Amino acid sequence: MLQAVAGSLSYRTIWLSDIHLGDRHCKADYLLEFLGAIRCETLFLVGDIIDLWSLSNRWHWPAQHSAVLRRVLELADGGTRVVFVPGNHDELIRDFVGNAFGKIAIERQAVHVSATGKRLLITHGDEFESWIRCSAFTRLLGTASYAALLRLNRAYNRWRSWRGKPYWSLATYVKHRVANARRAIDSFEQAASAHAREHDFDGIVCGHIHHPSQREIDGILYCNDGDWVENCTALAENAEGVLELLHWPRLRAHGAGLRAANDHEAATAAAAAATR
Ligand SMILES: [Mn+2]
């Protein structure tokens, strides 16, 4: 399953979304490890990368959040094609669609052709909320109870890590068990795959609902790359065109890519020492 080459995970394509830099629930430390462990030809940033809503409420920008952006720029400099498809939390950047920030192209939507010739539509996914009667996710993800759930999630995981256990998303567990959340997730997935079918795509890759998934819905491949506030997941395509969801807390628990992560930590420490 994994292609660990000299401590690095090599893929043809990687999709990341819902990183929410600028929000204190962003798991930038895990993301930095992941970005240090991967190599890819194309990286799609599928929206809600920078949480401008959260930043406008309360300024929060630790050094790790800059380090994430720096690492993305490094990948672009190193020859990775980086395409940024803004979401609703970084909607302001939609004004720059068709332009590029350095080597990063900004697109409203993108099309990806897999190594097996499958045509996939890449879009953040907030547009599918209008298909769901009441904006279930804006409500769910914008509410005090979701923020409280993420706070509880953090406290719970501090306790887990103190006991030497890997990260486990309590928030995801709760969402799975709340009937309303399950129904909202289901109608979102139906709307997204119906849209892909109507526009003659073989599949769709989106984010937005913080619910990683890879499944076929009436012949359409539906992929959701998840998020980095709860699940710490990415979607990846290998050289043969096989798609898989990467769950970083699980991968790192199994030791994959840890060498690269350690190298990255060493490099970060060296860089910090150099600037002192
Ligand atoms: Mn979103």
Image (cartoon, rainbow, N blue to C red):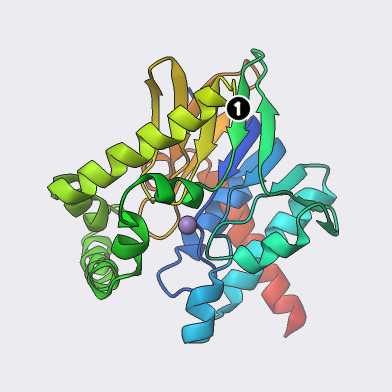
Q: Residue 142, how many percent across, how many down?
A: 35, 69
Residue 15 falls in image quadrant: top right
Q: Residue 133, how many percent across, how many down?
A: 31, 50
Residue ID at (22%, 50%): 181
Residue 6 visible in this rendered orientation of the protein: no
Q: Nearer the viewer, residue 91 or 226?
A: 91
Q: As drawn, is 250 to the left or to the right of 198?
A: left
Q: Amino acid at mark 1?
A: Leu
Residue 159 falls in image quadrant: bottom left
Q: Is residue 194 above or below residue 15?
A: above
Residue ID at (45%, 35%): 192
Residue ID at (60%, 77%): 63
Q: Is residue 237 above or below residue 209?
A: above
Q: As drawn, is 275 to the left or to the right of 61?
A: right
- Identify the residue under disc 1: 120
Q: As drawn, is 133 to the left or to the right of 264?
A: left
Q: Residues within 10 Å of mark 1 (few under 14, many from 20)?
A: many
Residue 49 visible in this rendered orientation of the protein: yes
Circle 1 SS class: strand
Q: Count how many numbered circles sit on residues in the image.
A: 1
Q: Residue 17, how many percent across, how many down?
A: 53, 51
Q: Residue 114, how many percent across, how many down?
A: 65, 21
Residue 93 falls in image quadrant: bottom right
